[in-house]
Amino acid sequence: MGLINTRDPAAAAHAYTGILGWSLAVGHCHRPRAGCTCADRFCRTPGAHPRHSGSFSLAGVEEQLLMEPGAALIAATEAFDALMMPVSMAMATMVRLDAEAPVPVPCLRAGDHGALLVQAGSGTLALTPRSRPLVTVRSGPGGWLALPPSAGTSWDTPPWAEPQGDPVRLLHGSDVRPYLHGSCSRSGT
């Protein structure tokens, strides 16, 4: 599992595509206090959208990473839905999930946001009226998520079982809903 834990973007890209089967691209970077490198002052997904359009082969991603050092490594949200929320809310949800969920729920930290990964197409079913204003769902081929080793990203709970490295089974959004709701209720949000 050293390949997935590596800080080498090309090695990480191989692991994400080979082990997890995720579609990858090279994305813009998010710069603290300076925004996204796409230069859109109102970018809604800083550092989590492709630099180039078109299809993305592993060889193409590796070539772009060599030409654009420091670029973000991003995954299309086709194999999963990403529940994006404030990091404190994500960590509170993860404490409960770690104690009670039947399988680990992948959780990524990206700056002041956290992302919980659930089954593709089920993310909106995790939302409650209380969590809806705080949580956004990235889903489908038009949604993207910055991945480690991109700047400012790290796995709190990785999407593979350690030490063998097999992909974890993602929970359905409706299975995550009570944990997310409980975190909102306890934090008073």
Image (spheres, rainbow, N blue to C red):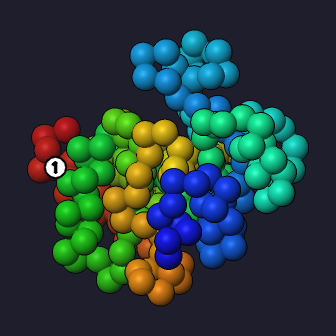
Judged from this view, the residue extending furthest toward the right is 54
Q: Quadrant of the C terminus?
A: top left
Q: Residue furthest bottom?
A: 164
Q: Is residue 158 above or below residue 54?
A: below
Q: Is residue 33 left or right of residue 87?
A: right
Name which quarter of the figure residue 135 lies in. top left
**Tag 1's secondary structure?**
helix
Residue 45 visible from this viewpoint: yes
The residue sitting at 20% across, 63% down in the picture is: 95
- Percent coordinates x, y for residue 112 in the rendering: 34, 36
Nearer to me, 112 or 71: 71
**Which residue is located at x 51 percent, y 60 percent?**
6
**Dot 1 alpha-carbon crowd within 10 angstroms: few under 14, some 14 to 19, many 20 or more:** few
Residue shown at 57%/12% (left/top)?
Answer: 41
Residue 150: x and y in percent read 53, 44
Q: How many marks?
A: 1
**Whether residue 139 is visible:** no
| Residue identified by numbered label 1 | 185
Q: Position of residue 5 (x, y in %)?
A: 47, 64
Indicate whether 32 appears above or below 9.
above
Horizontal relation, residue 121 to residue 160: left or right: right
Q: Residue at x 62, y 47 (%)?
A: 73
- Residue type marked 1: Ser
- Is 188 rendered above or below residue 121? above
Q: Provide residue 79's location: percent of width, then percent of height.
A: 64, 65
